[in-house]
Image (cartoon, helix red, strand yellow):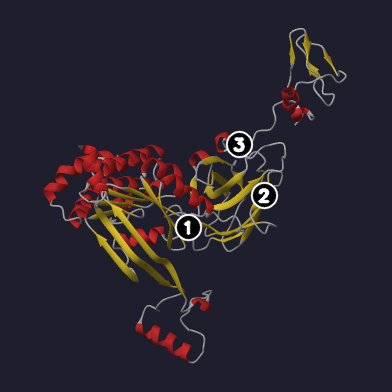
Amino acid sequence: MENQTHAQNQRVPVIQVSGLKKQYKLGQIGGGTLTHDLQSWWARVRGKEDPNTVIGTDARLFGKTFMALNGVDLTVYKGEALGIIGRNGAGKSTLLKILSRITAPTEGEIRLRGRVASMLEVGTGFNNEMTGRENIYMNGAILGMTRAEVDSKIDQIIEFSECGDFIDTPVKRYSSGMFVKLAFAVAAHLDSEIMVMDEVLAVGDMKFQQKCLGKMSDVAGQEGRTVLYVSHNMSTIRQLCTRCVVLDQGRVIFDGDVEQAIAVYMETTDVNVVHYDLMDVSRMNASAGKRMRLETLDFVGKESSVFADTEKIRVRITWRVSEPFAGVHLKLNLHFRDSTPVGITHPVNLGAAVPGKLYTTEFEFDPSLLGEGQYFFYVDVFDGVLAQAVCLDKPVTEFAFEVTSGDLTMPEWAPGWGRIHFPPVKVLENGYDGGYFHLPHAVSCVNRAGARAAQPPRQVHPCAEHLCAGSRNPAR
């Protein structure tokens, strides 16, 4: 009976989007006052320089537009957990903002059946001067709930958020992690038919992320509510979502099975980009990029970011600081193309830095241990030791590259092999009762009797020859 009810819920549309478009104007819009706007208009009429243009602004952008969404058609049914994935700039956050009524569409029609609880950015929907408890009641009122209805749920919200000791403290004193915990608890427990979640869960700790994913699964599967979830972490998409949409350049390029959607998304990864302008890209949290800011990143000496496994990957970054630092540290967080974590590099000290200078740093790392495939990394710049690091900058940009193998003795890399290609094992002993196998290429070996010698060639089993092929250089 429950399965029949769930199947019926699946076919009740709660979100219907038709021909949705969102256009933004590029460059500075408006001078802040009517006088400044008239001055700028009169200067353009006469072909003169705008007296109110900020120094460094690219005047060529004036009048140009950008289509963040370009004809999106989408239907979401009751009880679905819909994943929305795509590269940065694909239009994911813009779609969620329109569905949450934060911004209006340029064209198109949207039909929503039910109330929407959204969590798009840290602190969205919260008043910094109010306490956590007061913000809970305010969000309940926005959703049309009475005080008695909020009273019945507030203990669950406080317990889930793990902020009980600070619930009567103004939220302006909360850390970004506390903000996320309370915001999610409010969105998940208050009465709304639609939950909209952007990738802000990345701010929380791992234990709380798993707690949130479990709650969202319960909300969609047991309570019959609809969840829209945006993330670059494919493992959480697999864990939570029953259906997935891929956006690219403001359009839906795939809508259907989760695994197929992830495969389509990975194919859109562009390994031909070798230069990244990081000045205006979003950061991982609100404090990143304030005291220290990365400006550009380049793969040095490359026309595409495809590297042989014998080739060093050289990267150049430019950066500035707004206050003096005795030492700025950098590490790379490496992921496979489906967002599976691979590892991190050992932190490196970029040295002391003072304001007013543009610093250029070149570094390289060795991809020889990586199996064939496409990867990306995040750049994480921090102050202090890694165990007590304070994030200085972390652009939300995936720096993609591909590793290819020149080893003709290896077959095509299989997904089940993992991501690390270890060096060949070093054979220290090889033999059988009463004799020994000869290792080719006159490599010395120890037989079971303990005798060491370089023996003349004998018939060697093919498996033994294959295993010892990497032993030409024992020191390797």
Q: Between marks 2 and 3, how big is the CA–CA gap?
A: 16 Å
Q: Residue at x 34, y 45 (%)?
A: 178
Q: Which residue is mark 1?
A: 88
Q: Which residue is mark 2?
A: 307
Q: How many marks?
A: 3
Residue 416 seen in the figure: yes
Q: Are marks 2 and 1 in contact (CB under 8 Å)?
A: no
Q: Which is nearer the eye, 225 or 174?
A: 225
Where is the C terminus found, in terms of image quarters? top right
Q: Are marks 1 and 3 in contact (CB under 8 Å)?
A: no
Is 58 situated above or below 4?
below
Q: Which is nearer the eye, 131 or 190?
A: 190
Amino acid under disc 2: Phe
Percent position (x, y) of residue 471?
A: 76, 27
Q: Which residue is mark 3?
A: 420
Where is the N terminus found, in terms of image quarters? top left
